[in-house]
Amino acid sequence: PAVVAGKLFPPLQRDFTMSSMMQPPIILLREGTDTSQGKAQLISNINACVAVVDTIRTTLGPRGMDKMVYDERGNNTISNDGATILKLLDIVHPAAKTLVDIAKSQDSEVGDGTTTVTLLAGEFLRESKQFVEDGVHPQNIIRSFRQACELAVSRVEELAISIERKDPEEKGQLLQKCAQTTLNSKLVGGEKEFFAKMVVDAVSCLDPVLLDLRMIGIKKVTGGTMRDSFLVDGVAFKKTFSYAGFEQQPKSFDNPKILLLNIELELKSEKDNAEVRLSDPAQYQSIVDAEWNIIYNKLDACVASGANIVLSRLPIGDLATQYFADRNMFCAGRCEEGDMQRVAKATGAAIQTTVSNILPQSLGTCATFEEVQVGGERFNLFKGCVGAQTATIVLRGGADQFIEEAERSLHDAIMIVRRAMKNASVVAGGGAIDMEISRFLRDHARTIAGKSQLFINAFAKALEVIPRQLSDNAGFDATDVLNKLRQKHALPNGEGRLFGVDVDSGGIIDTYANFVWEPSLVKINALTAATEAACIVLSVDETIRNPKSEGADQAMNPGNMGRGAGMMGGRGMGGGRGRGMRGRGRQ
């Protein structure tokens, strides 16, 4: 027999081996394609995400530290905003980029909580890492995490306290508390009361239905102190480029008429390639006069409209500047698009694309207009506007980096106040809501049989990272603070559900009673975004790197190739656009 006791005789064994060697290999991917798969790849992705989270972990809370990020051009940014730091880090790891995306979405959706959402996503992954190493299928973890997220969101909605049906003054105070909680962890936290009132006043100026953020302008002027910052109930913008006649124009008006244009008021000459054939030399003067008549007709139309102030997005030349100065009118050209839109919204003016037949209702008005000196800059202020659904904040500060960070801080506070006005419900901050959700999920997990109990417990444990990190960043014993919080939140009838971390004394405190509030939408968005990000990372079991796309990137940026190939005997050889290319480099 050919086979005895499951063994092959030598001739048949040799034929079987040769047939298997002759079978051609199956090649699915391009040569050079790098693939990584399996448990090791999933754990590698988790480690990359955790490494990113550890970078911004210390920026959380009112005692969080700042990060300084600088690039090769010498630009440096000081910030403790999670989204700003992650954008500046230029992360290349494909899985870790997910954290950058959720930070950006949190920033654009609610404005604050960018560090929180990143920290939660990293902690969810850290807790699930042990289960993955033990051989648990990722889909089981994902299913339980999504179930836990739904329970957590429903619990936040139950605990949310509505600030609707309050009188305007009381509601303004409540909104200021929300803004102060946001500013507390920023660089301007020392003046949080001052800026919180400014932010609430600015948002209150907007259309209550749209709440369009573009109608709030933030102008930065170096010099002075934070207390020198001020709010303009209207529009303020920096003095634009002007010609000599500008200084002869009046710099203040009461109840002026305002004309907004989107045309040039300059003497336009013919193009270089224009050809005009004349039969009589005397006709040349008529052509020159026609050019002057065009600009003068435009200027006469502006004066005839009754306007005292003329603003244009396009240049206003020296002839027009002097013409308006002789008639006691103010003009400014090259105004920014955003400033023009805010002036139109505040004064009721309509931007005109022609000066023909300007109607009286197309002109805007305000109570006062004046040009004032702010630090080393001159600003044009429009105050007392009739339909002022816009405002401008002028920020002062000692250093450019400080003012930039102050602008980012105010943007977060404006977004929070805007969201609180749209969704008027708040929850206790300082880690109180996180500890309460964690306790709720632990209690719920005890009612579940099977592996899901472990996964929901891990989700609940991950939520404790917020109060733990708040304690660590403030320099307190996180274990001691967490034990006190667990004890307080375990009290019957929910007596301690509003207790969070006291970053001043190192103990625990009723954060709601002490006005440490945040809109419930911030926490709901953070929980859902962090859970989705963790589930996306857990669902990836293979990473494929395509060499073709890398080659395309190099082809799009051949400058590096030119510099590298320049060592091969010539300047710019091989790269196509090296330093030695004529017409592009030295000539």
Image (cartoon, helix red, strand yellow):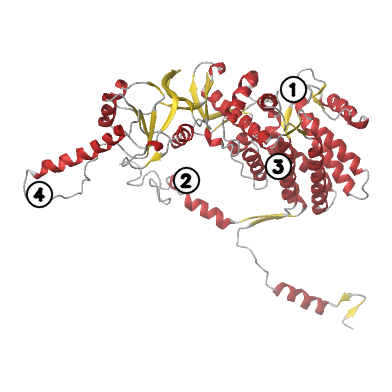
Amino acid at dot 1: Ala
Q: Is residue 326 left or right of residue 542?
A: left
Sequence-wise, the earlier of marks 1 and 4 is 4
Tell me the CA gap for discs 3 and 1: 24 Å
Query: Could you tell me which secondary element the residue under label 2 belongs to?
Result: helix
Tell me the CA gap for discs 1 and 4: 84 Å
Amino acid at dot 4: Leu
Identify which residue is drawn at 85% across, 48% down. 134
Closest to the observer: 406 or 56? 406
Instruction: Give the labeled residue for mark 2.
Output: 560
Contact? badges 1 and 4 (CB < 8 Å): no
Query: Could you tell me which secondary element the residue under label 3 belongs to?
Result: helix
Residue neighbourhood size for the residue with mark 3, other residues' Cα within 10 Å, grouped as few (<14), some (14–19), many (≥20): many
Instruction: Give the labeled residue for mark 4.
Output: 278
Sequence-wise, the earlier of marks 2 and 4 is 4
Sequence-wise, the earlier of marks 3 and 1 is 3
Instruction: Give the labeled residue for mark 3.
Output: 49
Q: Which mark is residue 241?
A: none
Q: Quadrant of the N terminus?
A: bottom right
